[in-house]
Image: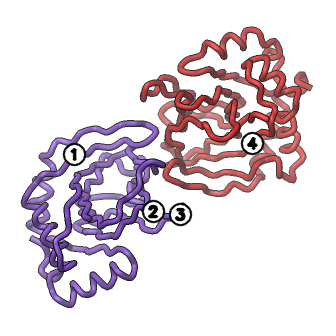
Chain colours: A red, B purple
Amino acid sequence: MLNKYINKKYLSFESLKSKFIHAKPFSHLVLKDFFSKNFINNFLNELKKENFEHKESDLFSFMQTHDLSSSNNHIVIEFYQFLNSNEFKEYLQKITGISAFGKIDCSGFIYTSKDYLLPHDDKLGSRKIAYVLNLSRDFLKRDGGSLDFFSKNKTVKSIIPSFNTFIIFKVTIGKSYHQVNEVLIDKKRLSVAGWFNDK
Amino acid sequence: MINKTYFDKSAIEDILFTINKYGSIQLHSFFNEEFYSNILIKISKIKLKKFYNPCLFFYRAIDFSDSEITSMFNNFVRILFGRKLILKSAKLFCFSHKDYSLLNDKINEIDGLKVIVELTDKWNNLSNGYNSFVQRNQEVLRVNSVRNSVTILRTSKNMKSFVKYVNHLALNDKRIFLEFVYV
């Protein structure tokens, strides 16, 4: 099944394992062109048809779908079922060394101008691995919307959104601090994000 | 000086009635213009300290020690409530683009009175930066920046507050306010 959905260059996981473990400021991977082209393009077209609702709190401002497990769209469900499959979770376990075979959380997000997610460590409940699949094209550094990783209260890594880039990081209390920088222009930052949970 | 209207007996009764019924009131054109302009000049000379903990807050502030302005507010709340209230803290805050404070599990408001003195000359409210007071996960009061206004609200230990992230529409403007806490 992995062959069908994932770019072949990522099927060998030995080098990914080392990169994940040694990444700074906390274990993570940034995997460009992660999903097969046809699959991700189809998924993007169908995801855009989902209902995104505005969500706001002290910590964030963005548009979010319901959990994609409840989608009525068979392409969206296919994507969800792949991420939630034991085969993909075993693949992640081989890369990260983290066992996260519980039900995944998975929602679509749109950040438009003025939207943001302030720094937090994601540690809540049974979350083990956080993931973000970027689905936006043409974002530049000056546009905002980067995923920023913190170390000692400073941003030490900024990941500019780029299409079909899959990011995973280990959720660790008091360590995996990250934010989505405010979007500064009139562009849509589209992504799918969530967590792989412990059983 | 404080706008004389706010010392009228009927005005004081109305203010108290509103605070008792709704928990808060925002008084506009609070100072006369000349005095307000002088406060802005005075405030602009105060050097603020940066407070930065990404998971909790990012702003500038300092303990406020100007005796003239502090005494003026101590006196105003004494007249308003007919008794002397104890000043617990007086702080000057400044929020600009990218600044915020978050709800904190460990910090609640106290049973008392909060007075927010707006010292912002120009502010686009679409840039946010408002004070939000929350009780049982519901916002119970939002204090937007209104030039030369004073907001008085009753606070309780079941209440929390935050200042909403200031977005890029703020440009180079700064939201500056004084916060007096009385018990």
Residue B158, numbered circle: 2
- Mark 4 or mark 3, whichever is nearer to me: 3
Residue at 86% x, 28% y: name it: A5
Location of mark 4 (residue): A106
- Label 4, label 3: how far apart the Cα atoms are: 27 Å
Using the image as rendered, state which of residue A121 and residue B84 is in the foreground: B84
10 Å crowding of disc 2: few (<14), some (14-19), many (20+): few
* Both marks 2 and 1 on one chain: yes
* Both marks 3 and 2 on one chain: yes
- Label 1, label 3: how far apart the Cα atoms are: 30 Å
Helix, strand or loop at mark 4: strand
Residue lying farthest to the right in this orientation: A1
Residue A34, numbered circle: none
Question: Please, what is the three-letter code of the amino acid marked with disc 3?
Answer: Arg
**Mark 2 and mark 3 in contact (Cβ < 8 Å)?**
yes
Location of mark 1 (residue): B62
